[in-house]
Amino acid sequence: MGQLIIQAGKGSMARLAAHRNPGLEIVYVRKGHLLWQTEGVAEPVPPGAVYFTLPEQEHGSAEEFEPGHEWIYVILAQGRRGPLHPSLGFSPSESVEIETLLRGSRRHAFGGGASMEGLLTALVEELRAPGYLHDARVAALARAAVIELARCVRAHQKAAAPAVRSGAQERVRRLVAEIAADPARAWALGEMADRCRLGRTRFAEVFHEQSGESPTRFLQRMRVRAACRLLRETDRPITHIAMECGFGTSQYFAHVFKRYTGGTDARTYRKQRSR
Protein backbone atom coordinates (compact mmCIF):
# COMPACT_ATOMS: atom_id res chain seq x y z
CA MET A 1 0.00 0.00 0.00
CA GLY A 2 3.03 2.28 0.12
CA GLN A 3 4.31 4.72 2.70
CA LEU A 4 1.72 6.22 5.06
CA ILE A 5 3.71 9.09 6.63
CA ILE A 6 5.36 11.59 4.29
CA GLN A 7 6.69 13.85 7.01
CA ALA A 8 6.14 14.57 10.69
CA GLY A 9 7.80 16.65 13.37
CA LYS A 10 7.83 19.82 15.44
CA GLY A 11 8.38 23.29 14.04
CA SER A 12 8.78 27.00 14.64
CA MET A 13 9.82 29.65 12.14
CA ALA A 14 9.44 33.39 11.70
CA ARG A 15 7.36 32.89 8.55
CA LEU A 16 5.89 29.81 6.86
CA ALA A 17 6.45 30.28 3.13
CA ALA A 18 3.55 29.45 0.83
CA HIS A 19 3.76 25.82 -0.29
CA ARG A 20 1.77 22.74 -1.20
CA ASN A 21 1.98 19.24 0.26
CA PRO A 22 1.37 15.97 -1.60
CA GLY A 23 -0.81 14.68 1.23
CA LEU A 24 -3.22 15.59 4.03
CA GLU A 25 -1.47 17.77 6.63
CA ILE A 26 -2.66 18.05 10.23
CA VAL A 27 -1.09 20.64 12.54
CA TYR A 28 -1.57 21.31 16.24
CA VAL A 29 -0.44 24.78 17.37
CA ARG A 30 1.08 24.59 20.83
CA LYS A 31 2.05 28.22 21.26
CA GLY A 32 1.61 31.55 19.49
CA HIS A 33 -1.07 33.39 17.53
CA LEU A 34 -0.68 32.69 13.83
CA LEU A 35 -2.44 34.01 10.75
CA TRP A 36 -2.23 31.44 7.96
CA GLN A 37 -3.75 31.52 4.50
CA THR A 38 -5.18 28.57 2.62
CA GLU A 39 -5.60 29.15 -1.10
CA GLY A 40 -5.36 32.89 -0.46
CA VAL A 41 -7.95 33.03 2.35
CA ALA A 42 -6.44 34.04 5.71
CA GLU A 43 -7.70 32.92 9.10
CA PRO A 44 -6.36 33.05 12.66
CA VAL A 45 -4.74 29.92 14.10
CA PRO A 46 -4.53 30.48 17.87
CA PRO A 47 -2.78 28.25 20.42
CA GLY A 48 -4.66 25.01 20.93
CA ALA A 49 -6.01 25.04 17.37
CA VAL A 50 -6.04 22.20 14.87
CA TYR A 51 -5.22 23.22 11.29
CA PHE A 52 -5.45 21.07 8.17
CA THR A 53 -4.86 21.26 4.45
CA LEU A 54 -5.85 18.78 1.77
CA PRO A 55 -3.31 17.51 -0.77
CA GLU A 56 -1.98 20.27 -3.07
CA GLN A 57 -3.77 23.13 -1.29
CA GLU A 58 -1.47 26.14 -1.12
CA HIS A 59 -0.97 27.48 2.40
CA GLY A 60 1.46 29.51 4.50
CA SER A 61 1.81 32.63 6.63
CA ALA A 62 -0.40 35.59 5.82
CA GLU A 63 1.74 37.84 8.02
CA GLU A 64 5.31 38.96 7.45
CA PHE A 65 6.39 37.92 10.95
CA GLU A 66 5.04 35.21 13.25
CA PRO A 67 7.61 34.80 16.04
CA GLY A 68 7.18 33.03 19.35
CA HIS A 69 5.18 30.00 18.32
CA GLU A 70 5.45 26.22 18.20
CA TRP A 71 3.58 23.55 16.32
CA ILE A 72 3.61 19.80 15.78
CA TYR A 73 2.48 18.28 12.52
CA VAL A 74 2.09 15.23 10.29
CA ILE A 75 1.67 14.93 6.53
CA LEU A 76 -0.13 11.74 5.48
CA ALA A 77 0.21 10.19 2.05
CA GLN A 78 -3.00 10.17 0.07
CA GLY A 79 -4.71 7.17 -1.44
CA ARG A 80 -5.31 6.57 -5.12
CA ARG A 81 -8.93 7.73 -4.96
CA GLY A 82 -8.82 10.42 -2.27
CA PRO A 83 -6.83 12.10 0.49
CA LEU A 84 -7.10 9.16 2.93
CA HIS A 85 -4.47 6.45 2.65
CA PRO A 86 -5.79 2.84 2.76
CA SER A 87 -3.46 2.06 5.68
CA LEU A 88 -5.71 4.22 7.87
CA GLY A 89 -8.31 1.46 7.71
CA PHE A 90 -11.40 3.50 6.91
CA SER A 91 -14.22 1.80 5.05
CA PRO A 92 -15.18 3.25 1.63
CA SER A 93 -18.24 4.95 3.14
CA GLU A 94 -16.21 6.39 6.04
CA SER A 95 -13.56 7.71 3.63
CA VAL A 96 -16.21 9.44 1.51
CA GLU A 97 -17.86 10.92 4.60
CA ILE A 98 -14.61 12.31 6.00
CA GLU A 99 -13.40 13.62 2.65
CA THR A 100 -16.75 15.33 2.00
CA LEU A 101 -16.60 16.93 5.45
CA LEU A 102 -13.06 18.27 4.93
CA ARG A 103 -13.58 19.45 1.35
CA GLY A 104 -16.83 21.17 2.29
CA SER A 105 -15.31 23.15 5.16
CA ARG A 106 -14.66 26.82 4.50
CA ARG A 107 -12.35 26.96 7.50
CA HIS A 108 -9.09 25.13 8.07
CA ALA A 109 -8.42 26.03 11.72
CA PHE A 110 -10.52 24.78 14.61
CA GLY A 111 -10.37 25.03 18.38
CA GLY A 112 -11.05 22.31 20.90
CA GLY A 113 -8.37 19.96 19.63
CA ALA A 114 -6.46 19.32 22.86
CA SER A 115 -6.46 15.56 22.19
CA MET A 116 -4.60 16.20 18.94
CA GLU A 117 -1.46 17.31 20.75
CA GLY A 118 -1.13 13.95 22.49
CA LEU A 119 -1.81 11.99 19.31
CA LEU A 120 0.69 13.89 17.15
CA THR A 121 3.32 13.91 19.90
CA ALA A 122 3.05 10.15 20.29
CA LEU A 123 3.21 9.72 16.52
CA VAL A 124 6.35 11.86 16.14
CA GLU A 125 8.04 10.03 19.02
CA GLU A 126 7.18 6.63 17.54
CA LEU A 127 8.62 7.65 14.17
CA ARG A 128 11.83 8.86 15.81
CA ALA A 129 12.22 5.79 18.02
CA PRO A 130 10.33 2.83 16.51
CA GLY A 131 9.09 0.28 19.03
CA TYR A 132 7.24 -3.01 19.11
CA LEU A 133 4.50 -3.25 16.43
CA HIS A 134 5.76 0.01 14.96
CA ASP A 135 3.76 0.01 11.74
CA ALA A 136 0.53 -0.89 13.53
CA ARG A 137 1.01 1.88 16.10
CA VAL A 138 1.83 4.49 13.48
CA ALA A 139 -1.29 3.58 11.51
CA ALA A 140 -3.44 3.60 14.65
CA LEU A 141 -2.18 7.01 15.79
CA ALA A 142 -2.58 8.50 12.31
CA ARG A 143 -6.10 7.10 12.05
CA ALA A 144 -6.98 8.57 15.45
CA ALA A 145 -5.60 11.96 14.36
CA VAL A 146 -7.82 11.97 11.26
CA ILE A 147 -10.84 11.05 13.38
CA GLU A 148 -10.00 13.83 15.86
CA LEU A 149 -9.69 16.31 12.99
CA ALA A 150 -13.07 15.25 11.59
CA ARG A 151 -14.66 15.58 15.03
CA CYS A 152 -13.26 19.13 15.41
CA VAL A 153 -14.64 20.15 12.01
CA ARG A 154 -18.00 18.55 12.72
CA ALA A 155 -18.27 20.12 16.18
CA HIS A 156 -17.63 23.56 14.71
CA GLN A 157 -20.31 23.07 12.05
CA LYS A 158 -22.88 22.04 14.64
CA ALA A 159 -22.07 24.99 16.90
CA ALA A 160 -21.90 27.63 14.16
CA ALA A 161 -25.61 28.06 13.41
CA PRO A 162 -26.79 29.29 16.85
CA ALA A 163 -23.82 31.66 17.09
CA VAL A 164 -24.81 33.31 13.81
CA ARG A 165 -28.43 33.67 14.95
CA SER A 166 -27.31 35.51 18.10
CA GLY A 167 -25.67 38.23 16.02
CA ALA A 168 -22.81 38.71 18.51
CA GLN A 169 -20.17 37.05 16.35
CA GLU A 170 -21.27 38.98 13.26
CA ARG A 171 -21.05 42.32 15.09
CA VAL A 172 -17.58 41.49 16.41
CA ARG A 173 -16.49 40.21 13.00
CA ARG A 174 -17.38 43.57 11.46
CA LEU A 175 -15.48 45.37 14.21
CA VAL A 176 -12.39 43.21 13.64
CA ALA A 177 -12.45 44.20 9.97
CA GLU A 178 -12.89 47.87 10.88
CA ILE A 179 -9.93 47.80 13.27
CA ALA A 180 -7.78 46.14 10.62
CA ALA A 181 -8.71 48.89 8.14
CA ASP A 182 -8.09 51.78 10.58
CA PRO A 183 -5.76 50.65 13.40
CA ALA A 184 -4.43 54.14 14.10
CA ARG A 185 -7.73 55.22 15.60
CA ALA A 186 -7.78 55.62 19.39
CA TRP A 187 -9.65 52.40 20.05
CA ALA A 188 -10.72 51.79 23.67
CA LEU A 189 -11.90 48.46 25.02
CA GLY A 190 -15.06 49.90 26.55
CA GLU A 191 -16.02 51.63 23.31
CA MET A 192 -15.45 48.45 21.29
CA ALA A 193 -17.57 46.36 23.66
CA ASP A 194 -20.36 48.96 23.63
CA ARG A 195 -20.41 49.06 19.84
CA CYS A 196 -20.90 45.30 19.77
CA ARG A 197 -23.59 45.53 22.50
CA LEU A 198 -21.66 43.18 24.76
CA GLY A 199 -20.19 43.31 28.24
CA ARG A 200 -16.41 43.53 28.34
CA THR A 201 -15.85 39.93 29.39
CA ARG A 202 -18.17 38.48 26.75
CA PHE A 203 -16.80 40.87 24.13
CA ALA A 204 -13.23 39.70 24.82
CA GLU A 205 -14.34 36.07 24.48
CA VAL A 206 -16.11 36.59 21.16
CA PHE A 207 -13.29 38.79 19.86
CA HIS A 208 -10.80 36.01 20.59
CA GLU A 209 -13.04 33.54 18.74
CA GLN A 210 -13.12 35.78 15.68
CA SER A 211 -9.49 36.95 15.57
CA GLY A 212 -7.55 34.38 17.59
CA GLU A 213 -6.21 37.16 19.84
CA SER A 214 -7.26 39.56 22.56
CA PRO A 215 -8.48 42.99 21.36
CA THR A 216 -5.26 44.63 22.59
CA ARG A 217 -2.92 42.19 20.87
CA PHE A 218 -4.88 42.31 17.63
CA LEU A 219 -4.82 46.11 17.62
CA GLN A 220 -1.07 46.12 18.27
CA ARG A 221 -0.44 43.67 15.45
CA MET A 222 -2.54 45.73 13.01
CA ARG A 223 -0.62 48.87 14.00
CA VAL A 224 2.72 47.14 13.48
CA ARG A 225 1.50 45.92 10.09
CA ALA A 226 0.60 49.50 9.11
CA ALA A 227 3.99 50.73 10.35
CA CYS A 228 5.80 48.09 8.30
CA ARG A 229 4.05 49.28 5.15
CA LEU A 230 5.03 52.91 5.80
CA LEU A 231 8.62 51.93 6.60
CA ARG A 232 8.85 50.08 3.29
CA GLU A 233 7.07 52.59 1.10
CA THR A 234 7.92 56.03 2.54
CA ASP A 235 10.85 58.03 3.88
CA ARG A 236 8.93 59.47 6.82
CA PRO A 237 10.80 59.64 10.13
CA ILE A 238 10.25 56.60 12.32
CA THR A 239 8.88 58.75 15.16
CA HIS A 240 6.25 60.22 12.81
CA ILE A 241 5.29 56.74 11.63
CA ALA A 242 4.87 55.60 15.22
CA MET A 243 2.46 58.46 15.95
CA GLU A 244 0.63 58.04 12.65
CA CYS A 245 -0.01 54.36 13.38
CA GLY A 246 -1.53 55.02 16.79
CA PHE A 247 1.38 54.48 19.18
CA GLY A 248 1.51 56.98 22.04
CA THR A 249 5.30 57.20 22.26
CA SER A 250 8.26 56.19 20.13
CA GLN A 251 9.58 54.09 23.01
CA TYR A 252 6.36 52.08 23.21
CA PHE A 253 6.38 51.69 19.43
CA ALA A 254 9.95 50.35 19.53
CA HIS A 255 9.02 47.82 22.23
CA VAL A 256 5.90 46.54 20.44
CA PHE A 257 7.53 46.53 17.00
CA LYS A 258 10.41 44.32 18.14
CA ARG A 259 8.03 41.93 19.87
CA TYR A 260 5.98 41.40 16.73
CA THR A 261 8.94 41.12 14.37
CA GLY A 262 10.99 38.68 16.38
CA GLY A 263 13.50 41.25 17.62
CA THR A 264 14.00 43.36 14.49
CA ASP A 265 13.93 47.11 15.16
CA ALA A 266 12.22 49.58 12.83
CA ARG A 267 15.44 51.07 11.46
CA THR A 268 16.86 47.67 10.53
CA TYR A 269 13.55 46.63 9.02
CA ARG A 270 13.52 49.72 6.79
CA LYS A 271 17.08 49.10 5.57
CA GLN A 272 16.35 45.47 4.74
CA ARG A 273 13.05 46.05 2.94
CA SER A 274 12.96 49.60 1.57
CA ARG A 275 12.29 49.84 -2.16
Image (tube, rainbow, N blue to C red):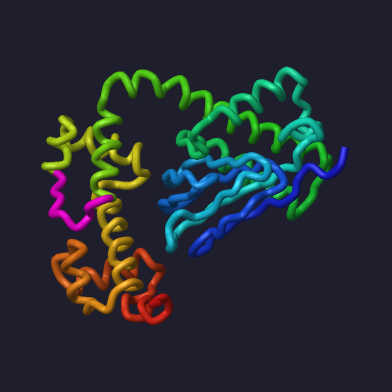
Q: Is residue 235 left or right of residue 42?
A: left
Q: Residue at x 19, y 58 (%)?
A: 184
Residue 61: x percent and y percent? Answer: 49, 55
Q: Which residues are magenta?
A: 181-189
Quadrant where the N terminus is found in the figure: top right
**Magenta-span inclusion, residue 184:** yes
Residue 235: x percent and y percent? Answer: 27, 79
Label count reads: 0
User: As rendered, which of 131 and 95 lies closer to the eye?
Assistant: 95
User: What is the magenta segment's predominant secondary structure?
Assistant: loop
Q: Residue at x 22, y 71 (%)?
A: 241
Q: Is residue 77 left or right of residue 168?
A: right
As drawn, 260 above or below 86: below
As drawn, 110 above or below 15: above
Q: Residue at x 12, y 35 (%)?
A: 194
Quadrant where the C terminus is found in the figure: bottom left
As drawn, 96 above or below 35: above
**Magenta-span inclusion, residue 97:** no
Q: Is residue 119 left or right of residue 136?
A: left
Residue 83: x percent and y percent? Answer: 71, 35
User: As rendered, which of 17 and 66 lies closer to the eye?
Assistant: 17
As drawn, 36 above or below 89: below
Q: Residue at x 16, y 68 (%)?
A: 243
Residue 223, quarter of the rendered image: bottom left
Residue 73: x percent and y percent? Answer: 62, 48
